[in-house]
Image (spheres, rainbow, N blue to C red):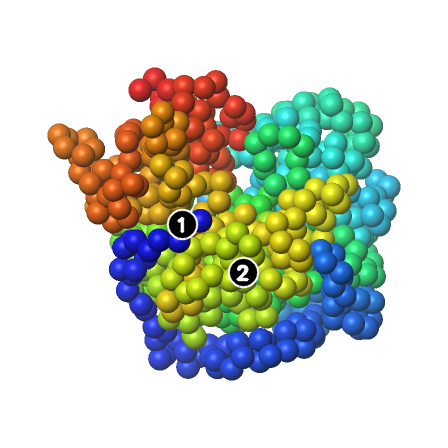
Amino acid sequence: MREDKREGIVEESKVFKPGAEFKARALVREEKVYEEAARDRIGFWGQAAERLDWFKPWDKVLEWDPPFAQWYVGGKLNASYNCLDRHLTSWRRNKAAIIFEGEYGDSRVLTYQDLYREVNQFANVLKSLGVNKGDRVTIYLPMIPEAAIAMLACARIGAPHSVVFGGFSAEALRDRLIDAKAKVLITSDGSFRRGSVVPLKENADSALAGSDSVEHVVVVQRTGTEVNMKEGRDLWYHEQMQKAALECQAEEMDAEDMLFILYTSGTTGKPKGVVHTTGGYMVGVSTTHEWIFDLKEEDVYWCTADVGWITGHSYIVYGPLANGATVLMYEGTPDYPAKDRFWEIIEKYRVTILYTAPTAIRTFMKWGPSYPESHDLSSLRLLGSVGEPINPEAWMWYYKHIGQERCPIVDTWWQTETGMIMMTPLPALTALKPGSCTVPFPGVKVEVVDHDGRPVAKGSDGYLVVREPWPAMLRTVYGDQNRYVNTYWSNWPGIYFTGDGARWDEDGYFWVLGRVDDVINVSGHRIGTAEVESALVDHPSVAEAACIGKSHEVKGQAVAAFVTLKEGVDVGNGLMDELKAHVAKKIGALARPDDIFFTPELPKTRSGKIMRRLLRDIAEGRALGDTTTLADASVVQALRDK
C-alpha cells in the first residue's frame, strides 16, 4: 500500500454531526458504549446475547483457538423461534412483519402471526419430503415472501439453507447444488423483471441435469408461466402447503450448529461456501441492526438488497425479524415502470429507514433529482449505504436529495464472511464524513496494518484486518477447511485479512479503498481504483466510473477509465482532457488516466456490482470470461464495438 500522503477528496470532506432532536430520541446516545466494549469485549458480547431467547444458556461466551472460534459454547437456541415465536406473546403478533410490493404493484402484508403460520407449514412440508436436521436445502427464488418463509422454515427444523441469487445462471446454480449436496431445491415458475419473466424453473431444470443429490423440487407459482413439472420430483408449493399441519416445534440447535451456507460469486474455480452458525450470527445481526438503524417499533424498514446476498440474509430476514421490525420487500428494479419507483414506494408505505447501495445512488444521480423531488419523502429519518465504498459526491447527493439534509447516513462496511456490519457510524453519536465508514462497531477490533501486520500511524494507508474474533464471523469454507485458513488467516497469525486496503485518517476514521487486488501499479506506485473513481465522479459531468489497470510497456500499468456521463451531458471537445486533468488535480499526476472510454452503461452483475474483470478483458483485447451473471450482456458488446 502507498505510504505517501497526497491531497485527495477524503481530506476535503465536510463533517456532519448528529442533530439534537435525533440524538434525544436515539436508542444508543452515550459515548461510553465504546469504552465499555473496549474494556471488556467478551463481557459486551455476553450481555448482547441476552437479547435473544435461549432454550439453554451458554457456558462460555468464546473459545478461541486461532483461526477457529466457538461462540456461546453450550448454548441452545433456534433462529426461527427468535424471529417469530417470541413475538407472538405480545401485541407484535398483529404487527406487520413483511410488507411485499411486487413489480406490477401487487402487494401483501404478513403479520408476525401470519408469517409464523406459513413458516410452520412449510417446515412441515420439508419434513414430509424427508428433510432432517443437517440436510442442506437450496433456495432459488425471486424477492417474494416465500424466500424468507423458506429460509425460516429451514432454520426451524435445523436444515442449513443455501440461498442462490435468482439472477444467477443455471451453471452457477448447478455448482452450488453440487457443492452443498442439496436434498431439496425450492424455486418458482419464474420471476418478474422489467416487465419480462425470468425463467427460474427452466434454469433449475438445466442445473439439475448435472446434480444427483436433489430428491424434490418445490415450485412456487409466481408468474403463472407454464413450466415442466417432472412427476415424482417436482411439487407445487401451494398444493403442499394446503396439506401441511399448522404447528412445527422449533428444533433445539447448538449455538455452533450451521445456520446457512452462502456462496461467494467468484469468477473462476470452485464456489466458496461461507459457513455461518446460529448463536453468534443471530447475536451479531440483531444487535447491529437495532443499534445502527436506531430501530423503533413504528419504523418501516427497507433494505433494497436481494435475499440471495448476505445483506438480505442479515438485514432483511434474520436481524430485522429477530428485532420485531416491519420489513419492506420489493420484487422489481428501481426503473420499472418508471425511474421514480423507489420514491413512489417510500411515499406509499411511509418508509422511515432506507438501506441501499452506492451503485443505486449513483444511478439515481445520473437520472437527476427531479424523480425523488416528485414524491413526498418526509417519512424518511435514517439512510444507509452498503456494498462498496461510497464516494463523497454520491454521499452528498443522497444526503441532500433523499434525506433532505436531515437524515443521518450510516455508511456500513462488512462482508459475506463477517456476517454482520463491522464498521459504521452510530447515528446519534458519530460525526459523519462523506465517504468514510467512520469507526468500528463497539466490540469489534478493526485495524489498518502494514506488510508485517503492524498497525500503521494515523494518516497512512495499509491492509484492513480484524484483530479479534467477532460473534457473526464465518466458521469455515464448506467442505474445505484448508481454503478457509489459507484465504483468510494465512497473512498474519490469528488475524483475519479482509482483502481490502484502507486509510486510517488523522481523526481515527477508516476509508476503505477497495480490494487490494483492485490496485493499479503505475511505475511502482500503487493507486487504488476506488480513489481514481471517486475523483472522476467528483466531476459535475460524471455519473459513474470504473477504473482498471491496463498493461503499459513503460509504466508496467496505466490507468484506464470507463465513464458514464450524466443525462444531458455531451462528450464535447476537451471533456476527456478535462477529466484527466481533474483526476491529476485531485490525486496526483501518477493517477491521470491514459485512456477514458465513454459508455452509456457499465457492465454490472444483477446485484449491481461492476464487473471490472470484463473491463480489463476489453481494455486488453482479450477473450471475455464468464458473462452469465451480467444484468445486460449487450453492454459488453457495445463496449467492445467502440
Residue at 51% x, 62% y: name it.
455
Rendering coords of residue 402 (x, y %):
33, 57
- Which amino acid is tagged 1? Arg
Say above or below: 414 vs 89.
Answer: above
Q: Nearer the viewer, residue 512 or 415?
A: 512
Q: Nearer the viewer, residue 365 or 514?
A: 514
Between discs 1 and 2, the one toward the N terminus: 1
Rendering coords of residue 330 (x, y %):
50, 47
Looking at the image, how many numbered discs can be counted on the residues? 2
How much space separates mark 1 and mark 2, taking CA atoms? 15 Å
The quadrant in which residue 58 appears is bottom right
Left-right relation of 418 to 642: right
- Find numbered disc 2 in the image and state the secondary structure of the residue it sits on: loop
Rendering coords of residue 164 (x, y %):
63, 39
- Residue identifier under label 2: 454
Residue at 75% x, 48% y: name it.
160
Left-right relation of 14 to 226: left
- Find numbered disc 1 in the image and state the secondary structure of the residue it sits on: loop
The quadrant in which residue 401 appears is bottom left
* Mark 1 Cα shell of 10 Å, populated few (<14), some (14-19), many (≥20): some
The reply to whether residue 70 is visible in this rendering is yes
- Which amino acid is tagged 2? Arg
Rendering coords of residue 365 (x, y %):
30, 46
The reply to whether residue 351 is visible in this rendering is no
Residue at 45% x, 19% y: name it.
622
The quadrant in which residue 547 appears is top left
- Residue identifier under label 1: 2
Say above or below: 144 vs 256.
Answer: above
Left-right relation of 506 to 40: left
Q: Nearer the viewer, residue 218 or 95?
A: 218
